[in-house]
Image (cartoon, rainbow, N blue to C red):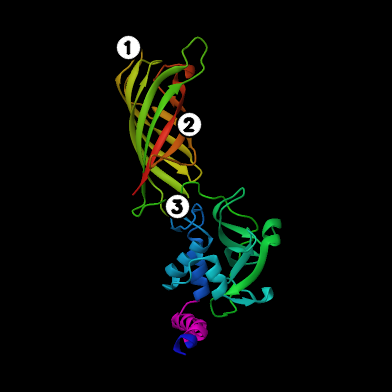
């Protein structure tokens, strides 16, 4: 008899627990839950994941509830759909859950933001990871099944900011604690100047950037380069600013150990300047490797523009601290 009582009363007990936790909060729980979920925008998709390095759709819901309210809720889409109270679509508020049938059964969940927008971890399509989508999009409109409620009704209205489509996703979200990303790049220097051998040397650089809670990454770096065109062996010192998409501008000086006797080896500012791009990282033997390409100008006073302009192609290994 006691077993039967537990089976039938456990949903009620769980509901009362959620209610009690809601009642203790001074600030809107739904607002805290939504804002916690928003901090993961750009995190890549990873089946079974619940953290900054990767998460799936139910992992996002689970982590947002844990971060904002210290509430442990079911971890899977099926168990979340069983827990949630199914409500009419017109009654939904920001913080309610949206359930979708994408595989022949309820298999995907998102967090409603208001105005038709919802936050979720997408695993397929042109945009993946934690993104914002809209119920008006053909695919989500076709696969949507019902709205579920796990928090008390609050009459909450959160402006959706006019978000109708997913924002750009960070292809390499920060995965450390302190906020620093170390990049180590090795590459070949080359160009297509007439009458010259295309490979003109090589370079190796180390750079540290601040990448936490910002969309622009300031950095400082140093390296070494051998350039046969100027017969120089140099140590570049540079500052940089990069974007989450991998585009980067850098400028600095160079300390020349050797160079063609006709060239002025004194440090110049700028002695090196350029633009570069890093691709989305690939996991190779446990390392995050990215393709690197730059267009740069290594300047000596009196040197012609054609000989100073060069391309740098290589690989970058990154480590977040």
Residue at the spot 66% in from the left edge and 67% down from the top edge: 145
Give the residue pinned by disc 3: 214
Instruction: Give the spatial CA distance, label 2 vs label 1.
Output: 30 Å
Instruction: Give the spatial CA distance, label 3 vs label 1.
Output: 45 Å
Residue at the spot 46% in from the left edge and 82% down from the top edge: 17
**Secondary structure type for disc 2:** strand
- As drawn, the residue found furthest toward the bottom would be 1
The numbered mark at residue 115 is none
- Please say if 140 is above or below 156: above
**Secondary structure type for disc 1:** loop
Indicate yes or no whether the magenta region holds residue 15: yes
Give the residue pinned by disc 2: 293
Instruction: Give the spatial CA distance, label 3 vs label 2.
Output: 23 Å
- As drawn, the residue found furthest toward the front would be 1
Region rendered in magenta:
6-28
| Residue mark closest to the camera, 3 vs 2 | 2
The numbered mark at residue 261 is 1
Indicate yes or no whether the magenta region holds residue 2: no
Q: Which of 6 and 27 lies nearest the eye of the viewer?
A: 6
Q: Is residue 274 visible?
A: yes
């Amino acid at each position: 008899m006691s077993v039967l009582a537990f089976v039938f009363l456990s949903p009620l007990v769980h509901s009362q627990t959620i209610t009690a936790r809601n009642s203790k909060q001074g600030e809107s729980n739904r607002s805290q839950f939504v804002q916690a979920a928003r901090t993961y925008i750009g995190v890549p998709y990873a089946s079974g994941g619940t953290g900054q390095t990767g998460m799936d759709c139910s992992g996002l819901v689970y982590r947002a509830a844990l971060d904002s309210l210290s509430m442990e809720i079911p971890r899977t889409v099926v168990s979340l759909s069983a827990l949630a109270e199914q409500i009419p679509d017109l009654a939904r508020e920001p913080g309610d859950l949206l359930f979708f049938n994408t595989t022949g059964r309820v298999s995907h969940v998102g967090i409603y933001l208001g105005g038709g927008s919802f936050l979720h971890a997408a695993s397929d399509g042109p945009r993946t990871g934690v993104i914002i989508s809209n119920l008006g999009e053909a695919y989500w409109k076709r696969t949507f099944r019902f709205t579920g409620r796990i928090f008390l009704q609050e009459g909450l209205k959160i402006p959706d900011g006019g978000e109708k489509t997913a924002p750009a996703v960070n292809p390499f979200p920060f995965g450390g604690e302190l906020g620093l990303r170390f990049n180590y790049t090795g590459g070949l220097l080359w160009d297509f100047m007439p009458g010259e051998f295309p490979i003109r040397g090589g370079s190796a650089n180390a750079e540290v950037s601040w990448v936490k809670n910002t969309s622009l990454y300031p950095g400082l770096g140093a390296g070494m380069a051998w350039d046969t065109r100027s017969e120089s062996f140099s140590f570049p010192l540079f500052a940089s600013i990069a974007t989450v998409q991998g585009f980067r501008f850098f400028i600095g000086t160079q300390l020349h150990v050797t160079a063609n006797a006709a060239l002025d080896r004194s440090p110049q500012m700028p002695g090196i300047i350029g633009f570069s791009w890093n691709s989305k990282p690939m996991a190779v033997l446990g390392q995050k490797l990215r393709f690197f390409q730059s267009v740069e100008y290594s300047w000596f006073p009196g040197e012609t523009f054609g000989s100073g302009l060069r391309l740098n192609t290589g690989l970058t290994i990154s480590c977040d601290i």
